[in-house]
Amino acid sequence: MSHFLAGMESARVVSCNVGKPVRVPSSSGDVLTAISKSPVRDTVKVGRLNLEGDQQADLTVHGGFYKAVYAYPSEHYAWWREQLPDAELPWGMFGENLTTEGLLETRVCIGDRYRIGSALLQVTQPRMPCYKLALKFNRSDMIKRFWLSGRSGFYLSVVEEGELQQYSPIELLARGEPLISVSEVLKLYRHKAPDRVDLERAIAAPLTSEWKTELRERLQALTDAPRKTGASGE
């Protein structure tokens, strides 16, 4: 477990970012999106469904109880600046509510509970990018770049409401069980031949239902594969 904890002792919020839906032009017409977030310097209330001053435009893919808050590691920004040297990358550029320090996907596990300010939040799933990210960056390849990078960030649900602000410390209160990191879940989703044991571990973790459904289908495919091979060989 020690490699999961490395660096978390000094985890903190680097920037707290909020925004509300606005209409922006696209090649197919105006799109309502809240991906543009602006940093907030004052204390922000953390509600069950979002931060004060924040709102999601399409609740079918963003927001809701299990995706109330989106966190993105500040450590990834240096890598993105190398990949996209012409892009402006202020905090919140990826649509995150919390730009964090000390919480990487390789260390953060599904179900982890963190005290941030006076609020208690729980990690629920990685982020799956949508077309609005490409719209924000004005790059048609941005979704693919984001997905292949493995730098997904992660969603959190709000277990206890409270308040937080820029530079609030992030304290790990409890680990998710069984231990499976955000990065491991991403690899299971992306890999064409995922490991059965790891799939079972992910399904047993407090992962959101939409991700579990996909992983169960992959596990079933592994179960069915030997039968199909045997049948074809008869």
Image (cartoon, rainbow, N blue to C red):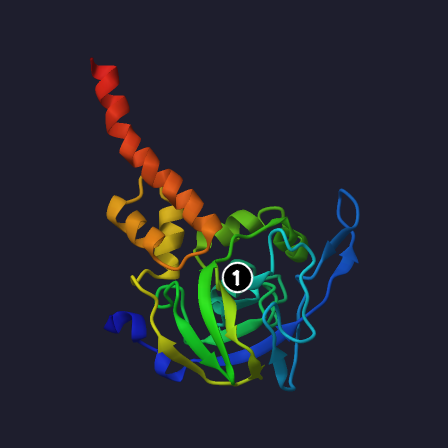
Q: Position of residue 161 (x, y in %)?
A: 56, 78
Residue 185 picture quarter? bottom left
Relative depth, front residue between 111 and 28: 111
Relative depth, front residue between 85 and 36: 36
Residue 77 appears left or right of 212: right
Residue 79 appears left or right of 43: left
Q: Is residue 57 visible?
A: yes
Residue 170 picture quarter? bottom left
Please give the count of numbered marks on the rendered protein: 1
Q: Position of residue 56 (x, y in %)?
A: 67, 61
Relative depth, front residue between 42 and 61: 61
Q: Helix, strand, or loop for circle 1? A: helix
Q: Quadrant of the C terminus?
A: top left
- Report the amino acid beneath label 1: Tyr
Whether 234 is drawn above or below 49: the answer is above
Residue at the (52%, 52%) spot, across then down:
128
Crowd class of label 1 (few under 14; some 14 to 19; many from 20; radius 10 Å): many
Q: Position of residue 147 (x, y in %)?
A: 48, 51
Whether 113 is drawn above or below 138: the answer is below
Residue 174 appears left or right of 24: left
Residue at the (39%, 69%) spot, across then down:
112
Residue at the (48%, 63%) spot, across then down:
153
Q: Is residue 192 visible?
A: no
Residue at the (66%, 76%) spot, across then down:
52
Q: Quadrant of the N terminus?
A: bottom left
Direction top: furthest residue: 234
Query: Which residue matches tag 1?
Result: 66
Residue 171 appears left or right of 25: left
Q: Position of residue 43 (x, y in %)?
A: 62, 86
